[in-house]
Amino acid sequence: MSHSRTFADLLTEYMERTGIGDAELARRINVNRLTLIRWREGVTERPRHRQDVARCADVLRLSTEERDEFLLAAGFQPETPTGVTSAQDDSTPARQEDELGEGRATHFSIRELRFTRKWTLAAAALAAIVLLGAGLAVVTNTLNLNGPDPTPILPTPTPTVIATHTPAATPTPTPRIPTATPLPATIAQDGESLILLAPFANYTVGAQGYNVSGRLQERIDAELRLSGLANARTFLWPDTIRSESEARIATETSGALLTIWGEYDSGRVLARFTTAQSPDGTGGQPVVNIASSPSELPTTINVSLTGAVRYVALMTSGRVYLDQGEYDRAKAVLRRAAIPPPEDPAALADVRYLLGIAYLEGERFDYDESIAWFSLVLEVEPLSVEALNGRAVAYMRRDKDGDIQLARTDLFRAESIRPDHAETHSNRGRAHMLHAESDDLNQAINSFSRAIELVPENGIAYVDRAGAYIARGQATDLSLARTDLDHALELEPSLSEAFLTAGLLFVARGGRAELLRSIAEYTQAIDLAPESADAWFHRGLANSALGFLAESAADLEKATELAPSVLRYQDSACRSLIVAGDAVSAVRYCDTAVQGGYDRALYSRTLAHAMLGLADDAESDLADYIVWAGSLSERACRVAHQDAAVLLEAPIATARGGAEMWDLLEFRPRTVIPGRPMC
């Protein structure tokens, strides 16, 4: 067995072989994605904990020999006995870290779309060239954004030898007393985005020094003010930073979002950037290199450098905000980065793509705006599979009449460009399930099967196919779904989506006892992934069907809190609160859904207004709802919604003082099987 390959080499090879990405592997072995990136890039040569490496080997499905080589490369004892032992595995510092934990962030996936775009540092650099004009050179390298792990590894203590005679006196070594780490010069407060600017190292012998960091601070502060970022702050770091490891330590200890540092002499200025994390796992340290002559140096520092740093700093900050789920901040920063628009096509497409993602998520989502930004990307890069997938998801979430077909068209085009892109096939399967016409579920199953062929170790793909089997509901489909769910759990025993879909399986079987069993499955999914909005949503619907109205309302409100951009959650929360007797609280959820373009929520808001005695408002909403229902292209859905509209006449009559009898419970949310027609 050869041990010549490094742990980073082996990890990269096995990840490429299985097709698993950084984010997915980090989630499945329960480590921070940043930690995994450090391993893969070789910045951290050896993981601290053996169990992390062992879990990684399990997920990567390594053979016994590969597993042993993997463990040895990481500095740990293999499972097959050898003469090699790992002092680090049993060291006191390692045990203490196991007991205290290392603040890992666990990311659970949900059944909504996941898509990423590679962090194209070269594109950002080219855009900086355009901003700076002729004579400006911008370069990038492939160094990881993170420096070496600052935690020192203590040497293995020398074993004590028990002598059989009195030895000669030997000097007692003076024990090493570790020096306490000094407190950072500043620390980011809760909710604050901190940008550090360190003094640039001056290598101009005997020449005038320049306050480079001060000039940069002025420019960045102005950009932050224009972006409206009240909780963003710059700070002048007191010490010159001369290496990536020093920059990394300053960034981590202060909790900064970004550190800008560098150097200059009579012929050049280098500006370097270190971020707290790399949002999409690609790593890379941007370096802006500006050539000049001694006489041009003041102009270079005061004009050209600040222009380049502005663009790179805004793009870097925007990506990190997206990764942290701070979508409003991301929008503000990325809009500033887009003015003026980069002339380089790749950089222009990059900033537009990020804006498309920013408008797709968060409380202030705007599907129309998101679709517009993805469309602008496709004007520049018509073969962008990522933009086609992004626009398709925006169409599916907006879900206006005809949107699902538009999504299917985008995904068909994406598949024709890259037939081996597994995410495209998964999204095509979801679009087929939303379309829910004749043969759509068969096509969905085919799409999910293709995704499984491309990435056979992806448990989510099996869960998706199980959902399609449940929706189709043929004689053997529930059995096939159970088989897929079992296989998904073999791959990932803690996969919350598998328990969620198992709940749908019980719902499909029908009956009160099965509904109760579904609630147990949904609860297990929530225990594993408390931020799974879909699990809260389906448990809320099951509780509603069982008549547990307060529990239903609480679950559905939680779903809207976790995924405010999913408008059907807003509509269901509105309906459940009405039936539970709280129409006042219900209206705001209906308003959000209607304002977001989810016209079917007009039905729920009509009922809410009727319950509040606002008969005119109720009649206005009902009229709009009937117009919307009549515009539907599918006759079956059109007739179903028009028939349902008749039921609202009794609540409106009651609001006007009439004495008609009607049952409020008839309006409670019901369980749904994704992929089956909703009308």
Image (cartoon, rainbow, N blue to C red):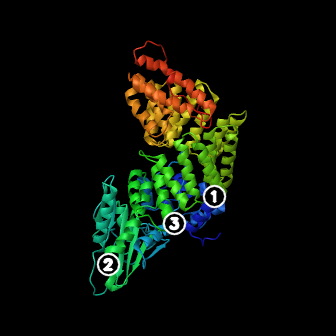
Per the image, the residue denoted by label 3 is: 345
Left or right: where 442 falls relative to 335: right
> Which numbered circle lies on residue 18?
1
Per the image, the residue denoted by label 2 is: 299
52 or 570, nearer to the observer: 570
- Residue at horizontal 64 percent and vertical 54 percent from the top: 413
Q: Position of residue 495 (x, y in %)?
A: 56, 45
- Residue at horizontal 56 percent and vertical 67 percent from the top: 7
Dot 2 alpha-carbon crowd within 10 angstroms: few under 14, some 14 to 19, many 20 or more:
few
Say whether disc 3 or disc 2 marks the residue closer to the N-terminus.
2
**Distance from Cα at disc 3 to Cα at disc 1:** 33 Å
Residue extending farthest to the bottom is: 206
Q: Secondary structure at mark 2?
A: helix
Left or right: where 71 falls relative to 580: right
Say whether disc 1 or disc 2 marks the residue closer to the N-terminus.
1
Q: Mark 3 or 1, which is nearer the eye?
A: 3
Query: Is residue 269 visible in the rendered structure shown here?
Result: yes
